[in-house]
Amino acid sequence: MEKPFVIGIDMGGTNTVFGIVDARGHVRARSSIKTQQYADINDYVNTLSDEMMKLVDSVGGIEMIRGIGAGAPNANYYTGNIEHAANLPWKGVIPFARMLSERMGVPCAITNDANAAAMGEMTYGAARGMKDFIMITLGTGVGSGIVVDGRVVYGHDGFAGELGHAIAVRENGRLCGCGRHGCLETYASANGLARTAREILSRSEKPSLLRQLDSENITSKDVYDAAVQGDQVALDIFNFTGRILGEKLADFVTFSAPEAIVLFGGLTKAGDYITKPIHEAMEANMLPVWKGKVKLLLSDLKEADAAVLGASALAWDLPQA
Amino acid sequence: MEKPFVIGIDMGGTNTVFGIVDARGHVRARSSIKTQQYADINDYVNTLSDEMMKLVDSVGGIEMIRGIGAGAPNANYYTGNIEHAANLPWKGVIPFARMLSERMGVPCAITNDANAAAMGEMTYGAARGMKDFIMITLGTGVGSGIVVDGRVVYGHDGFAGELGHAIAVRENGRLCGCGRHGCLETYASANGLARTAREILSRSEKPSLLRQLDSENITSKDVYDAAVQGDQVALDIFNFTGRILGEKLADFVTFSAPEAIVLFGGLTKAGDYITKPIHEAMEANMLPVWKGKVKLLLSDLKEADAAVLGASALAWDLPQA
């Protein structure tokens, strides 16, 4: 079989994780480097390439590799550039895809991590075979990747799919890192859940297991653990979060009429505690034509592999030299 | 030149208007029939075809026609069916594209009028040369056609692009014909503007030229005429309407990062009185990455021709036998 593997790179502010992936979505080899150790982008690309070549050699050499896909903050799919990424050590516009491609001798594509996640679900995961779906990543923030007719929506400038910054609460909405108020991300992210927990705890005197914790650092895991114990405040937190998210999901459906919405990220580990209120609010707010018709799915990619798989999925369709 | 013309059909509840269109967007011949006169879809298709053939003969015969595009309520692009359209005389699912294509001997495609409008702007109008834009039609209701990478977004079921039913006002939103509350359509349509006029007039005692009119039948033309006289209530009505619409337009941009948003319909005739508050609210609510970058355009197709042109634009790309 000609060129049976691709490489996926998940570039984060702290670590850069990468792996060699086969067509069935198995990670054959993996490694990582520390992103922050390389103040110069050339040093970073050199080390990353050297480390990747070790993996490449272990699967039979570079002629086995079809291409490289990378998920990175502020990555522009059209240009291959990383543009002004606040969480990375390099300022300005970095022609990352070109640099890596020249160094490795195979084609390279990049996009942001939510778009990569959507590619991963479509190629190996819960959205296999689907042509129209919306990927929502519920992490520190809320990301999205929108697939229309089998292709990720990149928009005019390459940055489409910022549904975490769709306005969920118009009146007295929470201040978002983007400078605006009421963004979905301020409610449905890990930080948003913690804010909700603090608000609900301070608004009432209701007893709760969560009162034993430092309210600044409450996680969805803490809230889940309390919910399992039947803690009503914990249930209220999930219900509020799920309702806000579900309302917006119904709104998103009016845009692209997807077959499914796929959720990924820490928040989804709360299982029914969060997915039930999401689904109920989504259906309660759905335009009649789509009521009961849009699937709400959870990612079925292994969490440890998902980011590398998603990035790798970009590489299958790269034009070959 | 091989097959230089297409036919566009604008099927409304009252009239069906159709015309022969050339590649530059000129309507070479046009006619119409009364939709409601045909209780049987077969009679309708027969009469429509006979009347179209008269026009076809006037431009040199059916071998000059590349295909037919039709804009109709509840039209499914994928199937070519009109499905349960409340405003048309025929119940159930009508295989309209197939019926017309068999009768006329040329291929036929259908979609709803907002998607047709988007095709019209991309082919002949304000969005010529654009690959990513959003069309918003401000008529009795609010319709939308979304173009991503040069193609209309139809979604999984063929009915994507219902931005008139995105929720604009979550708390105490107005009841919409769809049964839900707060849809954009209940604010930014002709009916929505009239509701706003009644609300603003009844909420205060402020003198206004609009108090001389029957408040049940106030139109955007009436409000425009008053605004031209410097009527503050009229300006308030446009400002409120424009703000609600502009806020949602900023939200829509997070989805597909369009190059432009193109507005069409009666409301846009109010000129700066409505476009200025729309644009201000859009920019005030825009995510920083898109601030000042998304054009807000008005359709530049002649109003009388726009629906036929839009429908006709569907036909240029039809596969030829």
Image: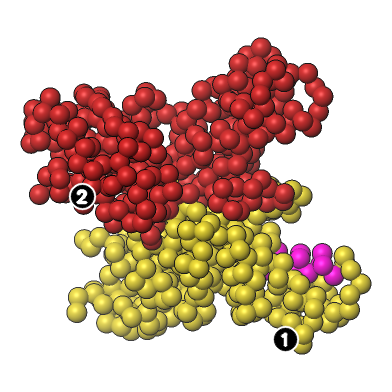
Chain colours: A red, B yellow
Observer-nearest of A275 and A255: A275
Question: Which residue: 27% across, 70% down?
Answer: B66
Disc 1 marks which amino acid? Val
Q: Quadrant of the N terminus of chain A?
A: top left
Whether residue B306 is situated above or below residue B75 in the rendered picture: below
User: Residue A72: x percent and y percent?
Assistant: 35, 43
Observer-nearest of A180 and A288: A180
Disc 2 marks which amino acid? Met
User: Residue B214: x percent and y percent?
Assistant: 83, 75
Q: Does the magenta stretch include residue B210?
A: no
Q: In which quarter of the image is residue B63?
A: bottom left
Q: Please identify the residue farthest to the right as the structure is shown.
A: B205
User: Residue A96: x percent and y percent?
Assistant: 26, 49
User: Residue A294: x percent and y percent?
Assistant: 50, 37
Q: Which mark is residue A99?
A: 2
Observer-nearest of B187 and A112: A112
Q: In this view, does B9 lie to the left or right of A67?
A: right
Q: Is residue B196 magenta?
A: yes
Q: Give the range drawn in magenta.
A: B190-201
Q: Label 2: chain?
A: A
